[in-house]
Image (spheres, grey):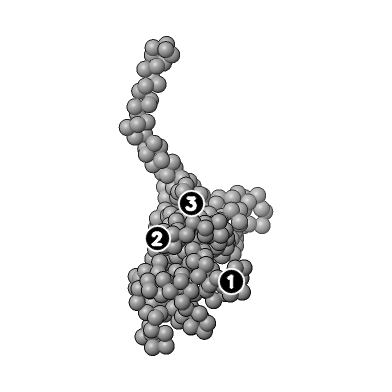
Amino acid sequence: MVGIGGLFYPRALGVGYDVIRDLLNARLIGIFLLGLLITKALIWAIALGSGTSGGVLAPLMIMGGALGALVGPWLPGGDPGVWAALGMGAMLGGTMRAPFTAIAFMLEVTHDVNLLPAMLVACVAADAVTVLLMKRSILTEKMARRGHHVMREYIVNPLHLMRVADVMEKDIPTVPASLPVDGLFQRLADEDPVMARRHEWAVVDDAERLVGLVTRGDLVRALEREDSEGATILDLGSRRLVVTHTDELLEEATAKMIANDIGRLPVVDRADPTRLVGLLGRAGVMAVWLHATREEQTRDSGWLSRFAKRVRRRVKGNGGE
């Protein structure tokens, strides 16, 4: 596909620095700009989509510059070179989520200080659009598709960094769907150490497929009902389950808990929703927050913090003098 694109528009191939220079100098006009824009966008998208690693800086500048130069004659000023520069800066600032970096870069490329006010407006506006329409920057999109989620905020939220598989409870005990309610009470009364300390139990059928979930609250309500005699665990528990998957971010799983007002989510195989692989509870989510808090405290207790604490203790020991 890259070769076919090069047959139609050879200048769409290569690094493209000469094309960028010609765009800034308004040497490319008319139908050639439209062909360059379409061809470069297609072959670049196909190349990156194939899984290979490739550059983004020059292709983004070519596409942004071609678009700016193409519409420049109908915009204020009518200078294709000026609008090509603004298009380059806007494309860089928006797709990379770095508007001020794009401004500095374009100032270095053009050495035109007069472009700074317009460049600021273009880059910030482009960044605002992409923040609303895109989850991630183009610089971190490939990492996210490989399972490494990267935040754009400066404060690291551990729920954005870890996945359900990292904290879920594995090898959880299950109860048969045909087990009478009295049978579960008997197992708890026998002080089964694995069963007694739990607050929920996964319900499976004869083929070990997940069919429901029963909680301690369900057992309490069963004691209060007079018609619960002879009922099975499947009759007692919940059958319409809200589930999660091992590859989901903890943020997504926690949002499901909050939206459905529940404290636990069965973790199932994405290919087979009836195959239980674990259980995610509030305790696991809180453990992540606790670990992140301790890590932050450990980082804060560096040599400078320890020195400041010693100084404060010495000052207090000297009567505050």
Which label sits in the foreground, 3 or 2? Answer: 3
Where does residue 155 sit, x and y in percent of width and height?
A: 47, 47
- Visible residue check, residue 55: yes
Residue denoted by label 2: 148
Q: Is residue 52 left or right of residue 198?
A: left
Circles 1 and 3: CB distance less than 8 Å? no
Q: Is residue 290 left or right of residue 257?
A: left
Residue at the image point whose x is 39% and y is 60% from the top: 148
The secondary element bearing badge 1 is classed as loop
Which three-letter amino acid code belongs to the residue tagged 3?
A: Glu
- The relative height of residue 81 versus residue 279 in the rendered view (above or below) is below
Along the line of sight, the residue nearer the viewer: 112 or 200: 112
Dot placed on the residue nearer the N-terminal end, 1 or 3: 1
Where does residue 201 sit, x and y in percent of width and height?
A: 50, 56
- The relative height of residue 197 versus residue 5 in the rendered view (above or below) is above
Which three-letter amino acid code belongs to the residue tagged 1?
A: Gly
Dot placed on the residue nearer the N-terminal end, 3 or 2: 2
Residue at the image point whose x is 42% and y is 55% from the top: 162
Q: Quadrant of residue 104?
A: bottom left
Q: Quadrant of the C terminus?
A: top left
Q: CA distance from mark 3 to mark 2?
A: 15 Å
Along the line of sight, the residue nearer the viewer: 185 or 15: 15
- Visible residue check, residue 137: no
The secondary element bearing badge 3 is classed as loop
Where does residue 179 sit, x and y in percent of width and height?
A: 51, 61
Residue denoted by label 1: 78
Residue denoted by label 3: 153
Residue at the image point whose x is 48% and y is 83% from the top: 32
The secondary element bearing badge 2 is classed as loop
Dot placed on the residue nearer the N-terminal end, 1 or 2: 1
Which label sits in the foreground, 1 or 3? Answer: 1
